[in-house]
Image (spheres, rainbow, N blue to C red):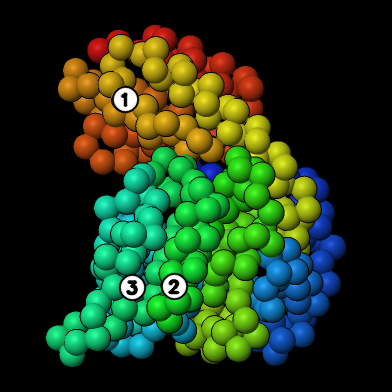
């Protein structure tokens, strides 16, 4: 009998629920390139209102929304300030250089979280030898940081510094709603702090495709042009936007279940003799380190043979991510597999 696959590689692997599929099939659509797809307009309006922003733009991916933001906020030769492990710098194919011709000043933050003092120390003087510091990017939650999230007061301090020094402030909020559930902060509080925000619908929220970029009306006007140049303008995109609306309406509060399951899996891992460290678990991402007695490739292969998929995240480092397709019986099965794993 074929084993059930338990896919813990990422929260991007989720599949639409029955309710989400029904919403997609029932969507009214137009042509979003002409600006007349009613469901896309509804999603963009909903997201903008949620964060208290003027406008929004629906895009195929979070990489695209981040890269559009960098492109609009900067000019070739400018510099972007972010954490060394930030998704916008580490996992977007060198897009900052390729798309915007900008350089990057990286900060060694605390599990992906940077401080106002660190930002201040990276701002270049007005000297022709240095690039112009133009944009600061924060990622909340931090992927490389194991799902860590920012303290709201620190974001407020960075935001104030940026405004006082004519810097733009962008939020890579791919997993913002995980941070929101963990902290209880209101999206309106976040919207006030940033010049632009990217939220992903296809991770913990469970939509099949899509991210939304938020900002001022003028910013989104420029962003729409950049989206076109990057090939991100879609036609009857309302079918996908309907999934995004359903996700925002039904899948935010349930993220707490993912966090609880991640913490329980973390306790299982801490009990394993071949696990040397589990990064503190704050949301739905688990990052842990294996001892030298358990080679990472062998461990991943063992899990795969047992029907469990995880992701290599560096030498002897593994990542697991909980999501809406991970059930209680699956956690029980994982516990059994870990218990039977021999060094």
Does the rendering let one see residue 116? yes
Residue 256 lies left or right of residue 156; in this view the side is right
Do labels 1 and 2 touch, CB within 8 Å?
A: no
**Mark 2 burial class by Cα count in 10 Å: few <14, some 14-19, many 20+:** many
Q: Which sits in the foreground, 246 or 96?
A: 96
Q: Compared with residue 255, is residue 120 higher up or lower down, i.e. above or below?
A: below
Q: Residue at x 75, y 60 (%)?
A: 245
Please identify the quarter of the rendering in which residue 273 is found: top left
Q: Foreground: 281 or 245?
A: 281
Give the mark nearest the N terminus, 1 or 2.
2
Which residue does the numbered mark 3 point to in the structure image?
A: 80
Q: Which residue is mark 2?
A: 162
Q: Earlier in the sequence, mark 3 or mark 1?
A: 3
Position of residue 266 relative to residue 159, above or below, is above
> Mark 1 and mark 2: span between their CA atoms?
36 Å
* Residue 232 screen position, x and y as percent: 53, 78
Q: Which mark is residue 277?
A: 1
Tell me residue 225's x, y (percent): 54, 89
Q: Nearer the viewer, mark 1 or mark 2?
A: 2
Q: Position of residue 17 (x, y in %)?
A: 73, 45
Label 2 SS: helix
Say few, some or many: other residues with alpha carbon within 10 Å of mark 3 (under 14 / 14 to 19 / 20 or more): many
Disc 3 to disc 2, C-alpha distance: 12 Å
Label 1 SS:
strand
């Amino acid at each position: 009998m074929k084993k059930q696959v338990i896919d813990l590689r990422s929260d991007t692997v989720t599949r639409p629920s029955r309710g989400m599929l029904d919403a997609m099939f029932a969507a009214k659509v137009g042509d979003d390139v002409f600006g007349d797809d009613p469901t896309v307009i509804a999603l963009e309006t909903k997201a903008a209102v949620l964060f208290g922003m003027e406008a929004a733009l629906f895009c195929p991916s979070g990489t695209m929304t981040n890269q559009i933001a960098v492109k609009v906020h900067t000019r070739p030769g400018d510099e972007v300030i972010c954490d060394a492990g930030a998704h916008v710098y580490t996992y977007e194919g060198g897009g900052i250089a390729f798309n915007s011709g900008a350089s990057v000043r990286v900060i060694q933050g605390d599990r992906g979280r940077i401080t106002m003092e660190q930002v201040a120390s990276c701002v270049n003087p007005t000297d022709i030898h240095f690039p112009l510091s133009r944009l600061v990017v924060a990622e909340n939650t931090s992927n490389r940081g194991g799902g860590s999230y920012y303290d709201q007061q620190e974001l407020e301090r960075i935001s104030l510094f940026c405004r006082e020094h004519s810097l733009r402030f962008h939020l890579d909020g791919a997993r913002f709603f995980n941070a929101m559930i963990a902290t209880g902060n209101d999206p309106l509080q976040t919207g006030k702090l940033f010049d632009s925000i990217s939220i992903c619908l296809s991770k913990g929220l469970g939509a099949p495709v899509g991210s939304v970029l938020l900002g001022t009306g003028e910013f989104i006007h420029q962003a729409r042009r950049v989206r076109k140049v990057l090939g991100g303008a879609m036609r009857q995109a309302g079918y996908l936007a309907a999934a995004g609306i359903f996700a925002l309406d039904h899948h935010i509060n349930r993220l707490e279940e993912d966090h609880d399951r991640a913490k329980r899996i973390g306790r299982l891992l801490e009990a394993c003799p071949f696990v040397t460290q589990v990064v503190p678990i704050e949301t739905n991402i688990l990052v842990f380190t294996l001892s030298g007695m358990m080679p990472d490739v062998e461990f991943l292969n063992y899990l795969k043979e047992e029907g469990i998929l995880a992701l290599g995240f560096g030498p002897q480092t593994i990542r697991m991510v909980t999501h809406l397709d991970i059930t209680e019986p699956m956690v029980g099965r994982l516990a059994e597999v870990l218990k039977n794993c021999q060094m």
